[in-house]
Image: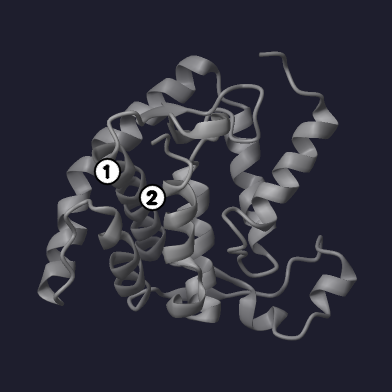
Amino acid sequence: RHEAPAATKWVARLLLGACVVAGSCGPPEASLRLEMRFSFFEDLSSEEAEAFLRNFVVEKAKADPELLRAGEGDGIHGDYSLASIEPLFSWAVTSARTIPRAPDPELPAWIRATPGISRDSFDLDAQSSLTVLRLAYYWGESFVRTFPSLRWSFGAADTAEQNMPVVTGFEKEMQLATLLVAENLFLRSITAGAQNAGIGRAVEFWKSLVAA
């Protein structure tokens, strides 16, 4: 592969940040949050990206049982099947806690004037942010366990997902950036309701990209 031009990567980042998966867009400020993720990972060396991936997979594998035990107490069975992803997400969102904040002044005025922007301007508290990380691992690990052709890796340098933990092996060289997908769907679930967040649609979208 050849390094993509900066403009091409910028467009890819814009599209990925605005609608990470199959029409499942987060609140207006989600793209700014995601842009911060892009900047962090772009600054990593390949060695640092590999270390981040290893830590992400190992540590979240250790932490996920805590989340799954809590879910079991409410009748949510987390068995790493694709069918379990949406119920687990929907259940986890019910415990989300947010911290209101003023709309970011760097956003264009027309976005700040959008009805509901104050409602959508918030940060996740520490526990909710941790939950997103655990859900991101669960999402990717469910696909890896379901399909032997998939594996954990970090995003290629010539893609919008460079250096991020991703699941690879999909058709069309698509990379499942689980942190982006999980955060986007979690935020959308908070603002629009889990039933309207497109979680199941996102699962089916990525499932359709696995070679038969």
* Secondary element at tag 1: helix
Residue 62 sits in quarter: top left
Seen from the viewer's position, the closer of residues 92 and 141 is 141
Residue 21 sits in quarter: bottom right
Seen from the viewer's position, the closer of residues 138 and 33 is 138
Q: Which quarter of the image is occupied by the C terminus?
A: top left
* Left-right relation of 138 to 122: left
* Left-right relation of 111 to 204: right
- Compared to residue 54, the image places residue 88 above or below, namely below
- Spatial CA distance of label 1 from label 2 is 9 Å
> Is disc 1 in contact with disc 2, using a CB cutoff of under 8 Å?
yes
Q: Earlier in the sequence, mark 1 or mark 2?
A: 1
Seen from the viewer's position, the closer of residues 101 and 84 is 84
Residue 55 screen position, x and y as percent: 32, 31
Residue 172 screen position, x and y as percent: 57, 32
Name of the residue lying farthest toward the bottom: 115
How many residues crowd around disc 1 within 10 Å: few (fewer than 14), some, or many (20 or more)? some
Name of the residue lying farthest toward the right: 109
Residue 30 screen position, x and y as percent: 63, 61
* Secondary element at tag 2: helix
How many residues crowd around disc 2 within 10 Å: few (fewer than 14), some, or many (20 or more)? many
In the image, what residue occupies the spot 51% across and 77% down?
Answer: 196
Q: Which quarter of the image is occupied by the N terminus?
A: top right
Identified by mark 1, the residue type is: Lys
Residue 60: image tag: 1
Q: In this rendering, which labeled residue sits more in front, label 1 or label 2?
A: 2
In the image, what residue occupies the spot 69% across and 57% down?
Answer: 18
In the image, what residue occupies the spot 44% across and 76% down?
Answer: 194
* Left-right relation of 8 to 158: right
- Compared to residue 96, the image places residue 145 above or below, namely above
Colour scheme of the picture: one colour
Residue underneath mark 2: 136
